[in-house]
Amino acid sequence: MLIGGFQKFSLIDYPEKICAIVFTQGCNFRCGYCHNPELVKPEKFEIPISEKDFFSFLNKRQKKLDAVVITGGEPTLQKDLIPFVKKIKSMGYLIKLDSNGSDSEVLKNIFDLKIIDYIAMDIKAPLKGYFKIINTDIDTKNIKKSIKQIMNSKINYEFRTTVVKDQLFLDDFEKIGKLIKSAELYVLQKFIPTKTNDLKFLKKQTYSDKEFENIKKIMQKYVQKCIVR
Ligand code: SF4
């Protein structure tokens, strides 16, 4: 595993649990708004943290932490993700995986093995609008497959979209709604320009609270629950 970093404690990254977060290096997308460029662009990678150090930390925190969140970057790119997840699971931790959903095969294997407890998948845009957000060519059939698998997995999940005002418009949310129709939870994430993959995004904005209420109304036609974060 290429571990770019870990956060020892968080109360907000796993629903209602105390967790640690491990960040993997490398991503196959190039979202302009990404706030983790040091985990995405190889030239910005730091020397990876050793798995030994990470597991020794987890050993010491058993019974103090409930869960581990595996995020990135894109964790499904890591060749040894499954043994890594199994090892964390065997220590008694709940596991949440964050993914961009581009590798439906890896996700299927993980669901079959029943080794994670929660998954959060990004929905970048309606399928036809993916390229303009992620700036790379992918087969969006895999995104559709991942959505279906997640909804059939019986694992707790959320779909989520980071919203930059000039990237997604009201009719895009109608299309996203159709794509994830009947989903249990959909999260609208306000884009906050702190650091970004593409520096132009530092000047971009998200919608106002009132505008988010309108987007939420659209999404509530399609999903069971929609929140703004
Ligand atoms: S936002 Fe997520 S999917 Fe996009 S480049 Fe960053 S880590 Fe990759």
Image (tube, rainbow, N blue to C red):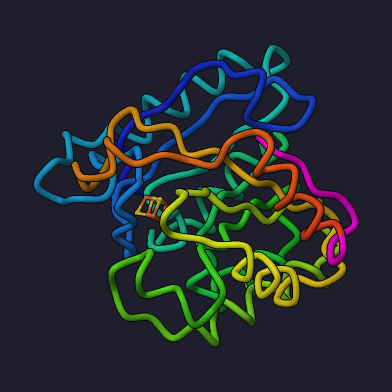
Does the magenta segment cover residue 222?
yes
Q: Quadrant of the C terminus?
A: top right
Tell me the quarter of the picture where residue 143 sits: bottom right
Total number of numbered discs in the rendering: 0
Q: Nearer the viewer, residue 151 or 110?
A: 151
Does the magenta segment cover residue 109?
no
Identify the main secondary structure in magenta.
loop
Q: Is residue 178 left or right of residue 165?
A: right
- In the rendered image, the vertical position of residue 7 relative to residue 182, given as above or below: above
Q: Nearer the viewer, residue 91 or 176?
A: 176
The residue segment tinted magenta is: 221-229
- In the rendered image, the vertical position of residue 172 relative to residue 23, given as above or below: below
Q: Nearer the viewer, residue 112 or 227?
A: 227
Q: Is residue 105 left or right of residue 158?
A: left
Residue farthest to the front? 210
- Whole-percent x and y of residue 218? 78, 60
- Whole-percent x and y of residue 68? 61, 33
The residue positioned 45% from the left and 49% from the top of the image is: 164
The residue positioned 80% from the left and 48% from the top of the image is: 226
- Whole-percent x and y of residue 171? 63, 70
Q: Is residue 25 left or right of residue 146?
A: left
The residue positioned 59% from the left and 69% from the top of the image is: 172
The residue positioned 58% from the left and 36% from the top of the image is: 208
Tell me the quarter of the picture where residue 179 sits: bottom right
- Whole-percent x and y of residue 158? 72, 52
- In the rendered image, the vertical position of residue 141 relative to residue 2, given as above or below: below
